[in-house]
Each structure stands twice: as C-alpha cells, then as structure tokens.
Image (cartoon, rainbow, N blue to C red):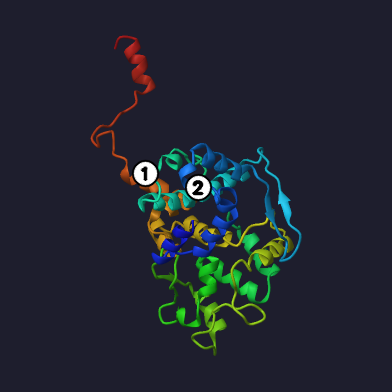
Amino acid sequence: MADYLQDYRRRGGKSVEGIESVVNRNILPALGKLPVTKLTPQRPRDWHRSLVERARYWRSRPGAPVNLAPFDPKDAEDVQRRRASANRCLTYLKAALNLAWRNGLVPSDDAWRRVKPFRAVEAPLVRYLSADEIARLRIATAGGFRDLVHLALLTGCRYGELTRFRVADYNAAVGTLSVRIAKGGKVRHVTLTKEASDFVDRIVAGRSPEEPLLRRDDGRAWKRAEQVRPMREACARAGIVPAVGFHILRHTHGSLLAMRAVPMAVIARQLGHADTRMTEKHYAHLAPNYVADTIRESFPRLTPEAAVVVPISPRRKSARASGF
C-alpha cells in the first residue's frame, strides 16, 4: 500500500490524503500484516464483505467520545451506501496489489482477481434541496459559513474546490471562477450568474489577489472536513430532515439546471465532469424535456406520410350491412 501511495503521488494523482486515510482506516488494520504471497481469494472476499456489516463510528466534535452506528440490513439505502464504500476500498486494494504484480513482487494476481465488487450499488440516490429548503438553510447560516454555502449553491463546486479559491481566481470581466486544482487534474472555468458575480464582487472588494476567496469568521482559510459540523447544525436549525451533507449543495446546483432543461453537456462542463455519462446518471431523470426531445428526434417514423386511415362512418357501416 505504501508503494501504491508513493506511485500515485508521483503520477500527480489527486485526493492522496483521502485515499491514504481510507487505506489506514480500512485496509491496513485487517490485511496489513499479511504477506501478499499468502493471500487467498477468500481472505480479501471476507474482508470486503465485513466492511459492509461493521459498525460505523463518528464524532460530534474533535475529542468527543466515539458514537457507533450499527449495521441495519433492513435499511436499503444505508446498505447500498456501505456496499459502494466497500467497493471503493476494494478498488484501492486491487490497484496496490496489481502494482506489486506488475513490478514482479508476486508471481500471480489470481487471489484478488477472483474477488468481485458488489453489483448495482452505484445507482444514483440524488438528494437535492427544494427552493424552500434553500431559503431555510440560508437563514440558518451566518458569517463565513453562510458565504461558503451560498457560493456552493451558486457554482456547484466541491468543498475542496471552494476552499482552494483565491481572490485572483475570480475574473470579473468574463464572470468566471477558475478551478486550478480540479478532481480530474485539469483547470476548468466555472460560469457565474449575475447573482453569483455580484456576491463575489462584494466579498473580494479591497482584498489582495493571493488571499483565500472564502474565509472563516476568524479570518483563516477553511480546512479539510471543517464543513461537516456546521452543516449538520445548520440543517438542524433549518428543519431539514434528514440532514444533508455539504456535497448535496453541488447536487442541488446540477438539479436546478437540469430541471430548467439545460443541456447535459452544459451541466457536465459546469460541474467538471469528463463527459456527460456521470451527468446523465445523476440528473437526466430531472430533465423530462431532455429525455422526451431525444426520443422524439431519434425514433424513426413507422407509418409513411402519405398513408391516411379514414374511419368508416356509422351510415356506411349500416349500408354495407344491408347489402347496398
């Protein structure tokens, strides 16, 4: 796993800290001391399944006691989320083992190649905020966190992208924000509406280009995972049940565009998707015009234009029945 993380960094992979956290929390404690040459298909298969059924832990605040969330097999959505998470862990494990195999450190990849991920777990369960929930959430937030939430809704940017914005990334002349470290490794330019441009104009006025665009109330930049607790507290104050995570603000932005019949390619470009597959997976069902127009434009006409079927009138029916 250490070789894999080092190779991933060398290739310029993104989110290395997140992958390393997954490795240290989910892979190494169970498999870290096991020699790869002694790995059997059953061992990673049992580990993969155990990730779904174990109790999940979380803390309400740093240093607080750990709270356990037991596995409930009757909660279909939670089971699906757990299986999707287990599949991601399996992907990292296989990537590391495949690297070891390609480097000649193990003679065969058979042990882990036989382990298959859970199927049908990536079906989108897209949650987005309604107009009323957006209004209540904005009322329930204040200060720097309110600015963070507002710009997330206006741009659809991820939390990490929002926290890395500098004042210099705002181009007032064309109304864009430049995401210089995007998830796919490419720079992208997020288009701002008039409302979004006015908002950014207000928060950048008189500030240095190298300053963080969004700041906490104490003046410092937002750091990793600092949005979790204030988002949960804001949902409680706003009466949003069940509470949503910060990433739902990104889904809300994409959903609002889809419901206004914005083309999937445009939404994909705004959100930074490599192509429209992910966009369609999450948002196409919210755009009935998109689906209907595509079907109507693509399906061929089965009946020739000249063929006209005239129904038989009741008088002609009775005349035919009487022999005339």
Reply above or below: 123 against 135: above
Q: Position of residue 28 (x, y in %)?
A: 56, 53
**Mark 1 nearby-residue class (10 Å; few <14, some 14–19, many ≥20):** few
Task: Look at 40% across and 66% down and name the residue there.
Answer: 10
Please report whichever mark, 1 or 2, sits nearer to the chain's N-terminal start.
2
Q: Say which of 292 and 116 sits in front.
A: 116
Q: How dense is the environment of label 2, judged by Cα within 10 Å: few (below 14), some, or many (20 and up)?
A: few
Indicate which disc residue 35 carries.
2
- Which label number is shown at residue 295? 1
Is residue 297 visible to us here?
Answer: yes
The number of numbered badges drawn on the structure is: 2
**Residue 8 badge:** none
Q: What element carries label 2?
A: loop
Tag 1 secondary structure? helix
Q: As rendered, which of 89 and 262 lies closer to the eye?
A: 89
Which amino acid type is marked by label 2?
Pro
